[in-house]
Amino acid sequence: MALEDETKLAVANIIKKMLKSPVIDFSNRVMHDQTGQPIMEWDGIFICCNKVFLCESKHKMTEEKIATLVKRLGEFPNKLEVTKDFKFKKLLGMECIGVACATLFPEELRQKCVDELGLVVAYRRCRIVSKYPQKYMDVNGIIITNISL
């Protein structure tokens, strides 16, 4: 599932605000091996300041889905080594940051993602809200987008 337009825009805007730099919406979402078989797919990919933000979107986020996201983040650099996709090869050496997006995202799980796993989280309330691990932030606190849903 690709990111919904408002979620995609909110995540891109928050990355831009956080890093104070333009954000590139990476057009490819599916990486292929040398035979052309898909080896990894993301719901959204953004590039900013030599960092690649890999987005996984679910309706309801669970511990199992977060564990899968973390595992895939660890596999991403190895997949870049074997991909035949030239555009993906350009991502080699960039810092990979996971972004977990969900409509239903339990608060305890959101906190674990940010505090323990170093993930960026985006979830819905009356607006899309994102939290970032302190190591990625210039200021303390939660950044809330101005996009109403």
Image (tube, rainbow, N blue to C red):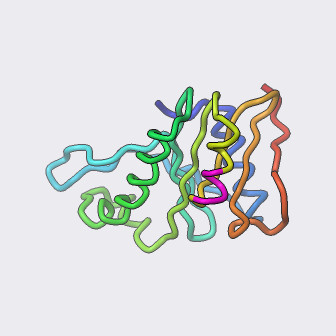
In the rendered image, the residue lying farthest to the bottom is 93
Measured from the top left, where is residue 144 in percent x and y? Answer: 82, 45
Residue 47's image quarter? bottom right
Measured from the top left, where is residue 64 in percent x and y? Answer: 44, 40
In the image, residue 145 above or below residue 81: above
> Would you say residue 115 sits in the magenta stretch?
yes
Instruction: Please tell me whether the stretch drawn in magenta is mainly helix, strand or loop.
Output: helix
Residue 49's image quarter? bottom right
In the image, residue 140 above or below residue 103: below
In the image, residue 134 above or below residue 12: below
Measured from the top left, where is residue 4 in percent x and y? Answer: 60, 30
Which stretch did the figure color magenta?
Answer: 112-116
The residue lying toward the viewer, choosing from 50 and 24, is 50
Identify the image quadrant of the C terminus: top right
Q: Which residue is painted at 52% across and 35% down in the image?
A: 62
> Would you say residue 108 sits in the magenta stretch?
no
